[in-house]
Amino acid sequence: MTKKYQNITGKIAPVVSLLVLAGVWLFVSEGEIVPSYMLPSPVDVARAFIADFSILMSHAAITLQEAIYGLLIGTALAFVIAVLMDRFDFLYKAVYPILVITQTIPTIAIAPLLVLWMGFSMAPKITLVVLTTFFPITISLLDGFKSADPDSINLIKSMGGGNFKIFRHIKLPHATEQFFSGLKVSASYSVVGAVISEWLGGFEGLGVYMTRVKKAYAFDKMFAVIILVSLVSLALMGFVALLKNIAMPYKRKK
Amino acid sequence: MEKLKANGITVSFDGVNIIEDVTIHLNEGEVVSLLGVSGSGKTTLFNVLSGLNVPDSGSVLLDGEDITGKSGKMSYMLQKDLLLPYYTVLDNVALPLIIKGTSKKIAREKAKEHFKFFGLEGTEKKYPHQLSGGMRQRAAFLRTYLASEGVALLDEPFSALDTITKTAVHQWYLDIMKDIKLSSVIVTHDIDEAILLSDRIYILSGKPGKISDEIIIDLPKPRNNSLLMSDEFLTFKRKIVEKISFVG
């Protein structure tokens, strides 16, 4: 099988499965197998999406903003923590359990607290995104740093390089691939985190829109916004994949 | 003139001596091989010479200066080429200069000057995974050369290559060494390689590993691969095979 042919079949499979899924949805809802107030048909959802398009977009812009700010701060924080934990072993031992514990606290439980502390502005939303995103990035960076080849590290030492040079030329580039897998996971978390925090208080954002349409029992709009949240997550993940491609040119050349 | 000297090196692990009282020296411009079977402590000795390990007793002198246990003094090359996959071949080769503080631009220019001579022309912008095994070892050797301040340690540098590539790389190495001055210690288990490339051979054998013999290879230089079939060469080979003791 040629490479090109494999590529085409690789792309066809997910498209087919999505179409089948949409077809089943259409059949079940349009055929009145499930009542339309419980499951709106894709046609209704598309109509709701088009009708509310400009409102949806303005809310999406807010949510995306929160997600990106949170992701950026989360990444910066993760980077500092990971570098320090890699450099100082006692910090690694002291901080690692705390990091794990923070991850066992459900996001939904701390979101109201953040609103109480910080009000209805963007701050509690961004904070929540930071809290949910920095962990996967920290862990992936740490793993990347720790798995650097000891022989390569010795090589830099043999050239007279110290800790900084080892970090710059071995550990950091070595961790790039893992960093981007962590970032990809975090990118999807960031949108979900922003939406959840918007549920609990705020004036704009997809989460706010969601609670409004839920109260109005507008299931078609509900589905439209859910799909939009997915699309925003996917777009952000796609952007991360693009960044990875730029940051790792050596992976492209074969 | 003695460039490098190891004096009475003993290394133990868990109370068992791996190598014992090893004394070797390397003269300026000389190529010396350390020949031994697996388990004779070649790599242990190599790690002491490169400063990666501290011996239990003994000392390593470079130009008369005590460098025992100090890394950063000696450049070395391993069987694994250790080319960094995320840097181009040019940046890999220029790395020792960059580490030593030369600016990236000047380091690249300096490294580039050697590409043609080392048979690496046209590979500058490629990544290591795009090169063949033989080419990668050439690049690793050029990097070792640029990293060195006159002495290079080569630990089985060509033993991961297939026989045909290895023969070609040997010839390449002999050609290069005609024109550059690089005092080298080659650690190897390949008798042909040791005779072909060296001025002198130390045989490391026994358990713990000790220097059991020193053989001067006074074959004329420059040498080439055709030497492998000559009577003089085979005489040396017979002599070494008789002397090398197989452990286990």
Image (cartoon, grey):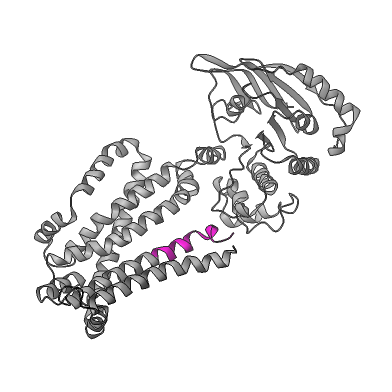
Q: Please state if A158 lies on the left or on the right of A101 as rendered.
A: right
Q: What residue do we see at 21% from left, 72% from top?
A: A206
Q: What residue do we see at 13% from left, 58% from top?
A: A114
The answer to whether residue A58 is visible is: no
Tell me where residue A191 sits by quadrant.
bottom left
In this view, A190 is above or below B19: below
Q: Quadrant of the N terminus of chain A?
A: bottom right
- Image coords of residue A250 (percent x, y): 54, 57
Q: Quadrant of the C terminus of chain A?
A: bottom right
Give, as a single range, the part of the protein colored magenta. A240-254
| Magenta stretch encompasses residue A9 | no
Q: Residue furthest bottom?
A: A51
- Image coords of residue B111 (percent x, y): 66, 52
| Magenta stretch encompasses residue A252 | yes
Q: Please state if A213 lies on the left or on the right of A129 as rendered.
A: left
Q: Please state if A3 lies on the left or on the right of A88 as rendered.
A: right
- Image coords of residue B141 (percent x, y): 67, 43
